[in-house]
Every structure is written in C-alpha cells, then in structure tokens.
Amino acid sequence: MKRFHYAWVIAVSCFLMQGVVVGLIQNCRGQFLTPVCNSMGYKMGEFTLYQFFQGVVSFFFTPIAGRLMSGKKFRPAMVIAVITLSLALFLSSSATRLWHFYLSGIMMGLSMPMLYVLAVPVLTNNWFVKRRGFVLGISAGASGLVGVVGNLLLAGIIESKGWRSGYLIIGLTIAIVLLPVIIFLIHLNPEGKGLKAYGYNQKEVDISTESSGMATKQALGTVSFWLIALTGFFVGILSTVPQLLQSYTTFLGKTPSFAATVVSVGMLGNIFCKLLLGFIIDRLGSEKTSYFSIFMISVSFFLILFPKKELLLFIGAFFTGMSTGMLSTVFPVAIKTLFGNKDYSSVYSYFAMATGLASTLGLSIYGFMIDHYGDYTSSFFMSAIMGLAAMASALLAFLLMKRRKLKEGS
C-alpha cells in the first residue's frame, strides 16, 4: 500500500485557495455591478474602473510576488496578502464615495498576484511531477464550484440584505478560510518537509527538470514568449465575460432568478471545462489543449449573441468557462512546455503580468463599451474576434519555439 503523500495536502490547499479567492471574488463580482450602480448612481464604466486600478497595481507587483514565491518570505507575504484582500472587501462594504472602490481595487491589486495568479501554479509545479494537469484542473474547478453556490447565495443576500452585506461576507470568508491554510498547511517545496515531489523519478528528473529550460532573460528574449503573452492577454480579457452574464440577462428583460440560473450554468461550465482541460493536458499536452480551448471560447461568444434562443444562451454561457480554464489550467503547463523548469516561477510571473492585467482591465473595457453602444452585442462580437486572434498568436508561439529547438538541436 502506497504511503500518503503530503503533496495531496498541498492540492487540497490549492483547491481551497482557488475556490475562495477566484470563486468568490472573480466569479461573483458580476452580482454587484447592477446593485451598486443603481444604489450609488454610478455608470457601469466608471464603477468598473476599480478593475483598472487593480490591474495596473497587479501588473507592476506580479514580478515582486514571483520573487517572494521562490524565497523564504513566501508565508508571511501570503498572510499579508490575505489580510489586505479582506480589508479591501471590508472597504467596499462601507464605501460611500467612488474613490473608495478605486482604493479597494488598488488593495486587491497588491494581494491578488500572490493568491490568485502565482500561488497555485508555483505550488503545483513544485510539488507534482506527475498528475500536474489533474491537480491544476481540480484546483481550478474549485472556483467554478464555489462560484455556482456563491452566485446563488449572494443573489439572495444582496436582494434581502443589500450589496454591502455581500462584500462583508466575502471578506470574512476569505480571512477565516485562508489564514489557517497558509499558516499551518502550505509549504513552498517538498524539500522543506524532507520529501520529493509526487511522481519524482531520479532518471526522469535528471533529464527533464532542474537543469532544463531557459533562464528568465533568455525566455523573455524570444518571440514565442511575447506571442504566448499576447495570447494570455486576449484570453485574460475574455475571462471577464462570464461576469457580464448577470447584467446581460437582466438587460434582456429576464427575471433575476433566470439571470442567476444563467450565471450558475456558466459556473457549472467553469467547473466542467477546468476538469476537462486538466484531463486533456495530461494526455495530449498543452499545445493541442490550447487550440481546443480557444476554439470553444470563440464559439461560446457567438452562441450568446442569440438571446431569443434560450438553449443557445445556456450552452454559450456554459462554455464561457473555457477562458478561465485556460488561465488556471492550460497556461501554467504551456509556459513549462515552452520554456522549461529552470526559472519557472520567474518566467511565469512575467507571463502572468499580461494575463493579470487583462483579466482585471477586461471588465472596465466591457463596461465602457456597453455604456457607449447601449447594448452587449458589440462586446460579444468583439470577444469572438479576439478569440480568433488568440488562436493565431498561440499557433505562432508554439511553431516558432519548435523551430528554435530544432535549430538548437541540429
């Protein structure tokens, strides 16, 4: 009988982290758009601008977070990140001015690189040699699972007690769940507990891990890095579309309960897509999985352009989960495939600058487009076109890296 490996405790910790941070904040923030704007008299674009401030701060702080994730200060840094994130939500709960939300966005920008962008990919890469795609998929699926429950609960809480109570409950949940996990359970590397990574094999490791891959400077100097970063930027923007489902269905004149159902279907798709992508990656690799994911993302946006056909709307909402699945499941493995393990946390942190900035700017971009055009059609059509552009840049990124490796091997 095989001994229990502590790597699975890390996997559970990643599951909880993704569920609470991504599931409650990223996947449920759409619940607040209409209530806050109606209550405070804000336009959609000016309110969602808090995402701009979050994105800018996150963009510049991500490389610093990447260095902290590879050093001895990672635990206190993560504790501070949790406290900062909770305080940001408490501030939103008590906000009386628009700039209060912007300050909250800045605080989120300081905390999210550690908790949302880097923690799970780095911990999974450190603790798992085998089953990496499976663990990423399961961990990422937590955000969809929590999102399904969270959207339904928050819809009821906001309707009965108001949006301020919604922000307050999310902030308390983050602190209560994550602080014990980070303080007592998480270890950055298996060596810290006298272990080897799950699936460790000395012969395979000698060939394929520590000594292989590009240094950070070398990776950043390749065209492939900037192309895959562009792909990540496009997908990062597209990953915010599920947050529009609540306000979109309300705009169509549907009931709040119908809108909540559409959002929940999107969250179920979020779970399914992440589990599916984790399964596919372990069998087909990150390149083919990337192409499949982007294709399905583009299809989903065309489907939700037909709101009168409710079945198509539900199917489209379901597969919008592919975009967040790519961010949390496909890209962490794709970066390793393209650039190796030598400076993984550093290279990934620079890549994550693009995805992090885009995913936090996306909602603001869509908000201003909706304000300008007065409907959602242009936004969703643009999303479909952006998906095709992401496909082209991903194809070029993998093609050029293959040619580079062939040239170096000859």
Image (cartoon, rainbow, N blue to C red):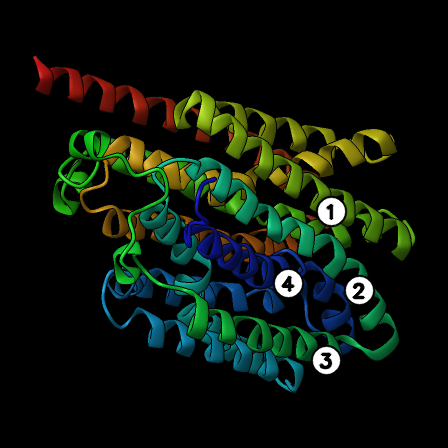
Q: Amino acid at mark 2?
A: Leu
Assess whether mark 2 and mark 4 are in contact (beta carbons under 8 angstroms).
no
Q: Nearer the viewer, mark 1 or mark 2?
A: 2
The picture quadrant where one finds residue 220 is top left
Q: Position of residue 295 (x, y in %)?
A: 55, 24
Q: Nearer the viewer, residue 192 or 105?
A: 192
Extreme-top residue of the structure = 410
Q: Amino acid at mark 3?
A: Arg
In primary-sequence order, the first of circles 3 and 4 is 4
Task: Kindly identify which residue carries mark 2.
Answer: 153
**Distance of mark 1 from mark 3, alpha carbons?**
27 Å
Q: Residues within 10 Å of mark 3 (few under 14, many from 20)?
A: many
SS at badge 1: loop
257 on left or right of 240: right
In primary-sequence order, the first of circles 1 and 3 is 3
**Residue 24: mark in rendering:** 4
In primary-sequence order, the first of circles 1 and 2 is 2
Q: Residues within 10 Å of mark 1 (few under 14, many from 20)?
A: some
**Distance of mark 1 from mark 2, alpha carbons?**
28 Å
